[in-house]
Amino acid sequence: MRIVQATLEHLDQLTPLFVNYREHFGQLPYPDSSRKFLENRISRKESVIYLAMADDEDKILGFCQLYSSFSSLSLKRVWILNDIYVCQDARRQLVADRLIQTAKQMAFKTNAVRLRVASSVDNEVAHKLYESIGFKEDSEFKSFVLPITEDFTAP
């Protein structure tokens, strides 16, 4: 397995995986919108997407997508591991581990203060994976979410 950074040339292969990832979390597929979303992230350099590729072919086994943020307190970059997905037939082959290790190396090389990841509270498989790589549950900050809906009106 080799890890490469996604480019626009990977869109045809990446989009179906991204659609599967979204469906896994209960979203409608929207393949055209998904492709445009990925195209915008890559072309605008708004995210970094790593692909796990099979050694013997150009098949994508999985991907992860990271977004850059910053910490005002540490005056450094923070990377958010926002998405990670491994194809069903490639699971239990350390694909997610390799993708996260690559993300960790990138965070180190960019002088980031931390790499953040979140998962659903009942996703024990992901929790064990993250802990095995060295992630710690955040005991300092509690996260909150403010949904911005279509019926939102500005004050």
Image (cartoon, rainbow, N blue to C red):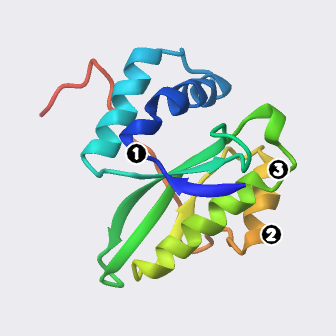
Query: Horizontal and vertical percent for residue 93?
Result: 84, 51
Q: Residue 45: tell me if it is visible.
A: yes
Q: Label 3 amino acid?
A: Glu
Q: What residue is disc 3 on?
A: 124
Going from N to C along the chain, the mark reached first, 2 or 1, is 1
Q: Label 2 amino acid?
A: Ser
Q: What residue is disc 2 on?
A: 132
Q: Is residue 80 above or below residue 70?
A: above
Query: Horizontal and vertical percent for residue 33?
Result: 38, 20
Q: Is residue 56 above or below residue 30?
A: below
What residue is shown at x 54% (from left), y 55% (from top)? 4
The C terminus is located in which quarter?
A: top left
Q: What residue is disc 1 on?
A: 7
Residues at badges 3 and 1 in contact (C-beta under 8 Å)?
no
Along the line of sight, the residue nearer the viewer: 138 or 29:
29
Going from N to C along the chain, the mark reached first, 2 or 3, is 3
**Discs 2/3, front:** 2
**Discs 3/1, front:** 1
Q: Decide: few, some or many residues near mark 3? Use Cα within 10 Å; few <14, some 14-19, many ≥20.
A: few
Q: CA distance from mark 2 to mark 3?
A: 12 Å
The N terminus is located in which quarter?
A: bottom right
Q: Label 1 amino acid?
A: Thr
Say what secondary structure mark 3 lies in. helix
Q: Residue 84: tell me if it is visible.
A: no
What residue is shown at x 47% (from left), y 51% (from top)? 144
What residue is shown at x 57% (from left), y 71% (from top)? 104
